Image (cartoon, helix red, strand yellow):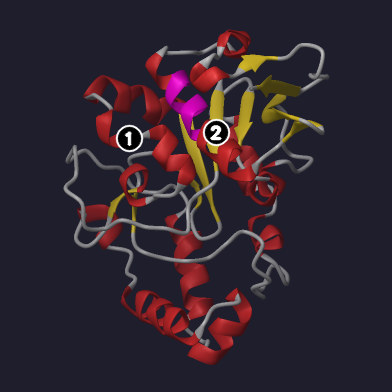
Amino acid sequence: MIAILSPAKTLDFESPLRTDRRTTPRFLPQAESLITELRTLEPDDLAKLMKLKRPLAELNVERIRTWNTEDHKTAGEARQALYAFRGEVYRGLDADTMSSEDLEFAQEKLRVLSGLYGVLRPLDLILPYRLEMGTSLATDRGDTLYQFWGDAIARELNSAGEVLVNLASQEYFRAAGTRALSIPVITPIFREQTARGPRVIAVYAKRQRGRMARYIVDNRIDDPVALKSYDLDGYHYDPDGSSGSEWVFLR
């Protein structure tokens, strides 16, 4: 079993690290190719492409300028993906409280999809970047990142597990869910019971994706059926609301 997460826009490259163990992203050559394309863009071009305000565009131009392959192999300014990403999903995951044994299991069972890096293991080194999977960046493979990555992400996930637990957003799962994906997919959906019936509330759903990823690590889950016992923060598996590969958890 393998579980996938989306990355986060919010990054942390300053907090103390909990481990010095690190690995190198498997799609580093492809990331370098994308950086080469991005270096051709002026700040105004990048702002338009990524829908950024000028100061944030200038920050990312500088990130792109200083990005280098060697830092991903020898640390340098890079840090492990699990500690670099912040935001609701990663607050739920709470990697800072993981033991060394937890990290070993997470390295085996969790993957983060990335517009720049394709697929990341938790301890893969990354540099600060911003490149959402839905970006329409033209390369020699097409006009979007979905075309750039093609079936590469799906093939990588096929080799990592026999079942895929999709804890990523639709934007990122689209890059994985190509025809090349040959393993079964289970997508947990987190809903709140409201006066208008069960609803997905984005901020809560994001947090629970991270919480479920942590639940997988804490309980060393390798069989997705065990996820039906998930009961954190008042959620419970809803068999009546679930169907096929979509498993609903209701609060």
Q: What residue type is labelled 1?
A: Ala
- Horizontal side of residue 12 vs 170, given as left or right: left
Instruction: Tell me where residue 108 sits by quadrant.
Output: top left
Give the percent coordinates (x, y) of residue 146: 69, 58
Give the percent coordinates (x, y) of residue 85: 39, 50
Give the percent coordinates (x, y) of residue 83: 31, 45
Q: Nearer the viewer, residue 48 or 145?
A: 48
Q: Residue at x 44, y 67 (%)?
A: 32
- Name the quadrant of the N terminus: top right
Q: In whole angstroms, how far apart are the C-alphas of marks 2 and 1?
A: 13 Å
- Horizontal side of residue 228 vs 66, given as left or right: right
The answer to whether residue 214 is visible is yes
Task: Give the residues drawn in magenta, as a range.
Answer: 209-216
The disc placed on residue 209 is 2
- Residue 211, magenta (yes or no): yes
- How busy is the neighbourhood of tag 2: few (under 14 within 10 Å), some, or many (20 plus)? many
- Horizontal side of residue 145 vs 219, given as left or right: right
Give the percent coordinates (x, y) of residue 245: 77, 23
Instruction: Tell me where residue 168 sits by quadrant.
Output: top right
Q: What residue type is labelled 2?
A: Arg
SS for callout 2:
helix
Q: Which residue in the protein does label 1 denote?
A: 95
Instruction: Tell me where residue 63 sits by quadrant.
Output: bottom left
Q: Is residue 85 above or below residue 227?
A: below
